[in-house]
Each structure stands twice: as structure tokens, then as C-alpha cells.
Image (cartoon, rainbow, N blue to C red):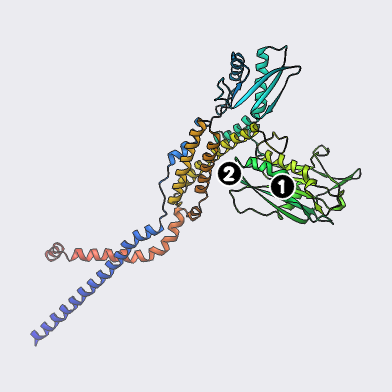
Amino acid sequence: MGSHTHKKVSQNKKEKKNCSDDDSKIRKYILFTYYLIFLLGIPIWWKTTTYYRASMPFYEMENARYKLESHLRFTPTFRIENDPDGKLTDLSDKLINEEPQFPFYELQFTESKEAADYSICISKSSESSSYWKGRNLYLEYKEDISEKEIAIMLVNRLYEVFSPEIMDISGKYSQLTSKNVPSKVYNKRSIQFSPQYRILLSLILGEGSHDLYGWEIENAVAKYLHPLIQQLSQIMNLTVESQVQYFVDDPPVTSKEGEYRTAFSDFPKVVNNLEKYLTINSNVREPTLHFVLYVPSQEIQPLKLEDQNGEEVATNSMLLPQWGSIIITNTNNSSSNLLQDFDMRSQFRTISKDLLLLLGVDDFSSFSLNPVVMERMLRQRIAESLVATTDTLLNLSKLIKSIENMAVPKEIQLYVKEALKSLDLAYDTLSERKLSKTLSYSTNSFEKAQKALFHSSMVTTVYFPDESKYGIYAPLFAPIMIPLLLSFIRMVSNALRSMPVFQRKNKSA
């Protein structure tokens, strides 16, 4: 009886031990499954949440500034035609070198016909005068002046022509190389550089009664604006659009000597009211230049614009820096319901002048540009594009370095490499004085740099700091990790206890 009972107890203990071992194995399998899922999940989670950052040529991007300083250099070269002994050329060259020089711009004289950009023809006359015809400068001097005085007159005339260009390029150059840009050289009137611009011509009718309902804008553009646009197309792309808007708020006016006047300070209010009527261009890389013909209400015509001193503005227009211009157009003497092209001749002369002013040129005398002004614009555009490209590359480098979680796809890397390559080609052709090719390469470089900076993938950047990430992930993983960690400690402890060494120590104790 006792023996039977002892066997039964032993059998029960054995069964319990087997059950306990089975439970322990199941627990281990479950824990190992969790650990395996967790260990496999970490690299998968890391891979799926990590942003791809292509390797960027940061050194070349940041070195672009120093390359600009050492490679941006213009050297307009002149040849005096009737100077057989070269004495006048030497005198003029010496006087030029005595003047303060800019590192990026230098006027030079040469005796080589092939190396000269411009020719100078000197002749005697009863009065001293000068004028340009094509690429030739004709300088007339009095018979009783010395050769040195002729050279001084020549150099002064050249600086009169080229100083505005030098100062304009100096301002753009200083924006990048100096934090404190001198106000005298920084032209805030000109619009920012872009390879292409949109010209929006608007006819705006005041809120009062009107007999006018439209304008012959196509004929006016073809006659007065197209020749200039055709010339400018050699160095930039221009698109022209037009619109008509009715019932726009008139500005505050005062009556004076049978005429209505509006002050310079009040006239911008018309522009503020216009903004809601003007169409917006969705292309950020195509800045819009606005040129507005404002026809006041019949009740306040003729309307004249007064300047800050109360004097009448001859053109009856206002230029707004980096925006465009608005021109008051009175129609009280017209019997037509249509603003005809010949009625807009003076307005389009103002538009042409203002367009060039916004593009950085103030030498304008007709509806076309002479070769000297065209080359001046070409050099200015080259300088603008090189400075803008360099600035864009520097900003892109700073942006990528400052935000570690920014996605940098392969496409951005390719854009930057293409921009740097075009930049090198631009400097190579500039040293060879091939200005048209230089502008082509520098413009392409600017476009690629802009595409890299404003790439759509940049908006996928994670702006959360690390503290925010921990605050998000901790509530998710902490409830899972604590039981797993405690189970792991217990499992290790049980495994150590089952080892023979620990069992012998327990028996001896």
C-alpha cells in the first residue's frame, strides 16, 4: 500500500515536471518569436523610415564663390583707327591704368584689329563732340588741343558710357562677396535675374462711366514693342500677355486749374487695388513685369500725376521697382470707343523705357538698341546669372547640411553636377571672350541650380527634432519592451539555475 502510494506521488511529480518543461519551452519559443520579429523589424523600420541622401559635391558647391571672384572678368577692348604710331593708344592706356580698377572689369586698348571689340575714329572739328554708330565711337576734337588732352577726353567719354555698367555689375558682385552692400552700387530698381520674363500689359478702366471698351493691343505691340523684344530675345526669353479690367477704384484726386491731379503718394493705392485684378503667374521661375494703362473715370479726366514737389510728371506715369509701371491714359479728347494703336505710341515709349530700366539699362533713345547697349546688357546678364547661380549653390549646400533628415534624391545630385559643369564652361568661354556662349552656359547653370534647390522632393523633409521623435516612439515601444525585457531576464536566470555548476552548488549547500 505504501509502496503503491509512493509510486503514484513520484509519477505525479514527473508529470508536473514534464508539464513545467513543456510550458517553459513554449514560453521560450514565444519569447524567441517576439525577439526575432523585433530584431528583423528594426532594420526594416530603419530602412523604410530613412531618407535617401545622395552624395553631394559640397566642396565644389562652396568653392563656387571663390571661383567667381577669380574668374569673373570683363575686358572691353578698343582700337584707335587713325593712330599709326600708337602714341595716342599708349597715352589712353596709361590713363586708364591710372584710374581705380575693379577686379572684374577693365577697359583695355589694343593695336590689333582682331582683338578689338570696338573701334574709335578720331577727327578734327571746330567743336569737341562724340557719338556712337554701331560699334564705332566717333570722337571730334578742336585743332588746338594736345594729344594728351585728346586722350583724356577719350578716356572720360569711355567712362561715361561704361561706368553705369561697371557700377551695376559691382553691385551684383558685392551682394555675394560682401555682407554690407554699398547703396550707391546696389540697384534695387532692377528685377531679379531670370532666363525668362512674362510681360503683362493691362488696360484698367476706372470705376465711373466710360465710353471706352477695348484697345488695339496686338497692333500696338507689333508696332512699338515687338522690335525691342526681338532684340532682347538674343539674351532672354520674353512672353507678352494682355488683359482688360473694368471698374477699378480711382485714386484720390484734387482739382486744379480745370484739371484733376493725383499725388505720387496716393497713386500707389491704385496699384494696391489692381493686385486683386491682375492675373497671377504660377511659374515662380518666370517673374512678371506689369505695365498698366490706367484710364480714369470720365468724371476726373484729364487726370495728371504730380511728383513730390507738386510738379506735373511729363510722362504721366510711375515706375515701381521690381514690379513694372502704371501710366495714366486720358481719353477725354477721343471720339472712339476703342483705344487705337497710334493713340498709345507715347505710352509704349514709356513702357519700353521702363522695361529697360527694370532690366538694368538706362541708355534708351528709341524703340531699338544699338550694339554697344546690347553688349552691355549681355555682360550684365552674364554677371547676374553667375552671381545668382553661385548664390543658389551656396544656399543649397547650407540647406542640406543644416537639415540632416532632408531627402536628397539622385536627381538633385545630377542637377548640381550639371550646374557645376556648365559653370566651368561659362568661365572657360568668358576667358575666351565668347560672351554669347558664356551667357548660354551660365543661364543653363542657373536653371539647373534652381531646379535642384526647388525640387519637389525637398518638401518631404522631416522637420521634427530628435526629442519629438522620442516622444512619439516611446509610448509605442515601451509597453512592449518592458514585458519582453523582464521575460528575457527571467529566462536567463532560469537557464543559469539549470546549469550543472549551479545544481552542484545547491546540493553541496
Which residue is located at x 41 percent, y 61 percent?
474
Picture coordinates of residue 428, whole percent (x, y)? 48, 33
195 above or below 49?
Answer: above
Q: Quadrant of residue 58?
A: top left
Hey, what amino acid is under mark 1? Val
Which residue is located at x 66 percent, y 13 percent?
147
Query: Is 7 placed left or right of 269 in the picture?
Result: left
Q: Secondary structure at mark 2?
A: loop
Hey, what amino acid is under mark 2? Pro
Task: Specify the label residue 221 is tagged with.
Answer: 1
Picture coordinates of residue 5, whole percent (x, y)? 12, 85
Give the distance between the C-alpha atoms of the residues marked 1 and 2, in whole angstroms. 22 Å
Q: Quadrant of residue 261?
A: top right
Q: Nearer the viewer, residue 190 or 267?
A: 190
The quadrant of the picture occupied by the C terminus is: bottom left
Of circles 1 and 2, which is in front?
A: 1
Q: Which residue is mark 2?
A: 195
Mark 2 surroundings within 10 Å by alpha-carbon count, few (fewer than 14), some (14 through 19), many (20 or more): many
